[in-house]
Image (cartoon, rainbow, N blue to C red):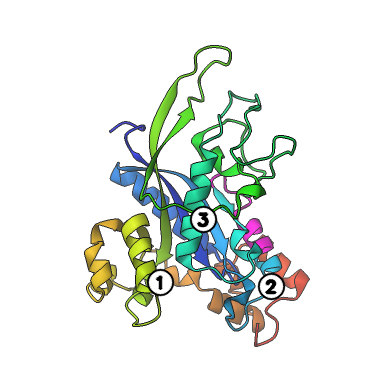
Amino acid sequence: MTETTKTHVILLACGSFNPITKGHIQMFERARDYLHKTGRFIVIGGIVSPVHDSYGKMGLVSSRHRLTMCQLAVQSSDWIRVDPWECYQDTWQTTCSVLEHHRDLMKRVTGCILSNVNTPSMTPVIGQPQNESPQPIYQNNNVSNKPTAAKILGKVGESLSRICCVRPPMERFTFVDENANLGTVMRYEEIELRILLLCGSDLLESFCIPGLWNESDMEVIVGEFGIVVVPRDGADPDRIMNHSSILRKYKSNILVVKDDLNHPMSVISSTKSRLALQHGDGHVVDYLCQPVIDYILKSQLYINASG
């Protein structure tokens, strides 16, 4: 299978990220490695989407802090981005609506023509006023100038943020070949692009709790998008799926990461990291990267038992 026939994937993780942990980043890395090993997928980007402040979870610090901590956690990554769209809305958004927003965003991003190396394209993004400079949603300074498909994530203006969504399960998009020589006839390639929800087995298990999730949302999330599950804390995703008729129905859209790593995925726990901070436990370095720890201490976050 060639690269152009493989499904290109953007991994989207929604959550409180209160704070974001090493385990959250590890989930992205493990998922990408596994999807590549299947030979069916190419992961071209990852999106961290922190929840809105009105989610109402006890001890949830301001999105201003959570966005900053997420940015610090991914600053060394050349493929994971932090998206503020959820936090910038008027109120809390469902996971389904976040997925639909990003699918709509990707459809419009593909209206861009990616230019040759180090040569900025003069073609405006669809929906972007031509007299304004587009402001990238996905901020990461550690990105090369090479206009690969992954750089689509930085080509979108804020003016697209509220455009209504459509729901094709997947699309075939056209990109300019990055090796094309400007001034000549450019070569185009079509690729299949999907946005998959990245989660731990605890979120998958929550789908089985009656009344917790809207069933029509579950149908869209699992049936139209798909899920990549990273097992944690010894949970068995196959057993979990058997407890939900919707999960059983769309089992083929649920990809369970299987690898040889024995990393304790409990290090993903934001709760444990907050407790470690509150108790002055030096093991907090097992949960959080140093820039995030430094920011937390500087901003005096999670010091009280409530936070």
Marks 3,1: beta carbons within 8 A? no
Q: Position of residue 45 (x, y in %)?
A: 49, 46
Q: Is residue 120 magenta?
A: no
- Quadrant showing the N terminus: top left
What is the residue that sits farthest to the top in this orientation? 184
Q: Earlier in the sequence, mark 3 or mark 1?
A: 3
Give the residue number, with chain letter if any, for mark 3. 101
Front residue of 278/13: it is 13
Marking on residue 203: 1
Q: Is residue 139 visible?
A: no
Give the residue number, with chain letter if any, for mark 2. 62
Q: Residue at x 45, y 72 (%)?
A: 266
State whether residue 187 is above or below residue 28. Answer: above
Helix, strand or loop at disc 3? helix
Q: Which residues are magenta?
A: 67-79
- Give the foreground label among 3 and 1: 3
Q: Earlier in the sequence, mark 3 or mark 2?
A: 2
State whether residue 51 is above or below residue 276. Answer: above
**Looking at the picture, which amino acid does disc 2 mark?**
Ser
